[in-house]
Amino acid sequence: MNDLNKQAFAPYHNDFLSEVEERVEDGAWVKMCMQCGVCAGSCPLGDAWEHTPQKIFMMIRAGKREEVLTSDSMWMCTSCYNCIVRCPRKLPITHIMHGLAHYAHRLGIAPKGQPTRVLNRLFWNNLVKTGRVNELKFSLAMYFKDGVVRGIKNALGMQAIGLGLMKAKRLNPMELLGGHKCKDQVGIHKMVSKAREIEERKKGFTS
Amino acid sequence: MTKRQYAFYPGCSSQKGASASNFVTSIQMMCEKLGMQLNEIPDWNCCGASIGYGEGGELPRLVLNARNLALAEQHLPGQDMVSGCPACWLATRETAERLNEFDDLLAETNEALKEAGLNLKGTVKARHIVEVLVEDVGFEKMKQAVVKPLQELKIAGYVGCQTNRPFGIAGESFENPQYLDKMIEAVGAEAVASYDQKVTCCGGALAFSEPDKSQKQIRDIVESAYDHGAEMIVTPCQLCQANVEIYQSEINKKQGTNFAMPVVYYSQLMTVAYGGGVKQAGLDGHVIQPKKLQDIAG
């Protein structure tokens, strides 16, 4: 266990449910699940989840901390919100899955190199930098996430699509040189840092 | 006619040269004809979209959206905030609702907003353009503005996820919403009533990180449009439009299909039906050419 993870685990030990309730976004809803399985059956990527949301809710109650947090299941969420609207108990399932994924990521124990985890980090860093997403830099960063050789291969594979979008004026190569941005970038950076600081304080992260 | 005024939040993909820039082009004439004036929120920022959660967490994400709400509140008082992009709308509306419900979250948000010289009271309503069209304009007015009915066009109305869930358009069902079909019919085209992939997920942002899983979804969406005799797909969502249009060539390459199904926005149909040309309707912004619609536009 890394230090941050140890420190998170210490006050709760095997009471993983309490840990989730107190530290994961919308975690207080978990105990409301009645195990009907509608979420599992409604997920467009359901087959790809090692543990479906239904199973994750039961695993949390059963104290399967390690298995839940190191799983790549939550990272399969496409944010389609099918589970939310169909849940008979009105659990905000999408938010809980996002919350668990973020918590595992924050503790540094989410699966390393998991593509959607990487995507999340690249996307957030890209948007916070200028206040707006730079689609070209974001796409390139994603293609090159596994190194230069793989990146060139990925980029070449997507070349036809890229050129098609350029021709349609929906991808601008000049975005590489800067591109769209907010005026008050300084304010945005300070604001996001402050929000992070408040959240860390509230959720009890000290480092 | 006095125009209805709205605080407009275009979102990143609608910027010039970005993946949905033709969407923003296509709404200009539609708004003009329907008496809507969209006033861009000064210096708006990204909403965090649906994949901001991993790195961003909860409060930083809420704060990003609160900044846009605060800017709208300050610069365009009394106006509803309108997004063209479902992800922008979802994030903004979720933020507005959460901050209205939880005083502690609002206080924390304002503590962070202060760093950017802003404060949010929480008076702004976050809406989607389709809501405005359905609720403020109405199908009858959408129909009355038609000068060139899109007769003989058979269209699959693909609503997708985030225009429909978790909020959706009031009074519509999540499983089979009718408004997009009604909009297609308002401009004189035929909506494929039996199109069974209407609310299927295209994979969203996972088109990047899980291409095979996402392309399986896209294949279903396109295939069903063909199976039901549709000549094109129409959607209200920027990411659905991009994903479903641009990955057809990849699916063809990998799976030996022969897809070339045009995917356009409802606003492009309306602009053409209201007398707009190819450029005004943003029909020059496609990878798969919507030939029939381009021909009607002239």
Image (tube, coloured by chain):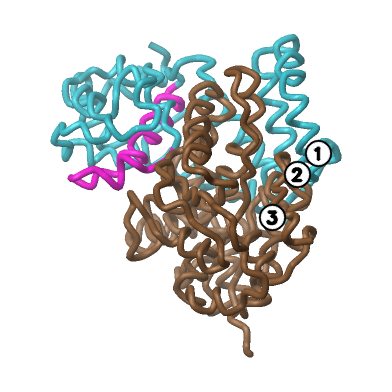
Q: Is residue A58 in sight in this rendering?
A: yes
Q: Is residue B194 above or below residue A108?
A: below
Dominant secondary structure of the residues highlighted in magenta in the image? helix
3 and 2 marks on the same chain? no
Which residue is labeled 1 in the image? A166
| Chain letter behind tag 2 | A
The reply to whether callout 3 and callout 2 are in contact (CB within 8 Å) is no
In the rendered structure, which amino acid carries the disc numbered 2?
Arg
Q: Dot 3: within a 10 Å radius of its alpha carbon, few (fewer than 14), some, or many (20 or more) residues?
A: many
Q: Colour of chain A?
A: cyan
Residue B293 circle label: 3
Q: Is residue A82 magenta?
A: yes
Q: Dot 2: within a 10 Å radius of its alpha carbon, few (fewer than 14), some, or many (20 or more) residues?
A: many
Which chain is in brown here?
B
How far from the left and from the top, in percent, is residue A128?
A: 64, 42
How far from the left and from the top, in percent, is residue B130?
A: 51, 64
